[in-house]
Image (spheres, rainbow, N blue to C red):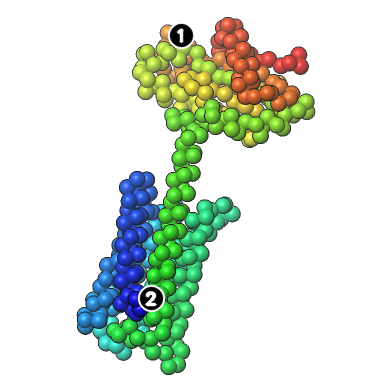
Amino acid sequence: MALDPPTMLTLSTALAAAAALYLAVEWRSIRESSLLFWSAGFATITVGSTLALLRGSGFLFIGIWFANGLLVLAHWLFLLGVARFTQQRLSRVWYLMFCAWLALLLLPDDPSWSKIMLVANSLLVALPTLKGSFLLRPHGKSLSIGAVQLRYVLLVHGLFYVAKATTVIIPGTLIDLAAFRGEIIQISLVEGAMAIMLIALSMTGTERYRREKQIARLAARDPLTALYNRRALEVRAPRLLDDVSSNRRGALLLIDIDNFKLINDLYGHTAGDRLLISLSEMIRAVLPEGALAARLGGDEFVILLGDTSNEQVVELGDKLREQFHQNAAQTFVTPQAVTLSIGATLFTRPPANLTALIEQGDAALYESKRGGRDRIRLIDPAF
């Protein structure tokens, strides 16, 4: 099959339709709005490429002016998708592109206007494409392979359209949009088909990476408090524990809410959940840099510290207890005070495993409960 213009347009239509369908299916499963905009962009290219075939039958207004306007709209939708993906807002100036598109429709459907049409259309495609590439710049943070690839594909695609616009100033350049005549038009059709394929692959890879990161993040977090769960703590703890030495002592604080059952019984489990969330926010607020915190389950939490001291552990525990007691007393009226018991243990060498360390904290917590609750019990092997 010869790669003549109608064949290339047919191929572009098929590729764009497949990309639009695939991205729409992906959107139904993960509901990322960027996928919806990208899918709409490829659907617009599908319609535009189909209408472009009509110019061969003499429908120049629809086949050239309207079809090329849809190409501009498609790239504007791509830009909106990138903005949603990068969580950045676009200036209202970008919405004026529709005015420029409508202005193109006012040009007479005469072959003599081919060069003007080519310049205007090329620049209106290049601007949102280059802006999308600019929004995907790393900002000093790592991007997924798909996002990096999308950034450079959009950059090359945008620069191609800038170069395409400049070809009209070359003497003797033949451009006939009605008859698909002219070397630059032939090259543009080939580039368009390749760009559709590469942009679609980059977009799907970008969102797939985001989905995988989101799944991994959710798997590592307690769904109620957003603190680490026990499994995530076990994965992250070795790095902190390996730095423990006689000069850089570590500590573990095991935290349990006293009389938590009263909250659930008197005010319901929703109130109990609110109290757990409140405690998790207090823990985050007092957590030193580099420390780890997790919810082990129920009303039991753990804090893991590195390079700390007796005084710092007691100060942190007392601050947490006082804040929690004040908050619980103001929010809930109970027959017995809802407070915190904390068992803490210091260590000068990395423990065999996190479980053994938690068991030591549990022993200290038991002593705190037995001593009357609402207190911190610290076990320091050095004393």
> For residue 334, what is the image quadrant?
top left
* The C terminus: image quadrant: top right
* Secondary-structure class at tag 1: loop
Residue sitting nearer the eye, 315 or 260:
260
From the top left corner, tell me how far across and down residue 141 is, in percent. Answer: 57, 52
* The N terminus: image quadrant: bottom left
Q: Residues within 10 Å of mark 1 (few under 14, many from 20)?
A: few
Q: Residues within 10 Å of mark 2 (few under 14, many from 20)?
A: many
- Amino acid identity at mark 1: Gln
Q: Earlier in the sequence, mark 2 or mark 1?
A: 2
Q: Which residue is mark 1?
A: 336
- Amino acid identity at mark 2: Leu
From the top left corner, tell me how far across and down residue 184 is, in percent. Answer: 41, 82
At 66% across and 15% down in the image, what residue appears?
378
Q: CA distance from mark 2 to mark 1?
A: 77 Å
Image-based side of 306 in relation to 131, left or right: right
Q: Which residue is mark 2?
A: 189
At 41% across and 85% down in the image, what residue appears?
183
Residue 101 seen anywhere in this rendered image of the structure: no
* Secondary-structure class at tag 2: helix
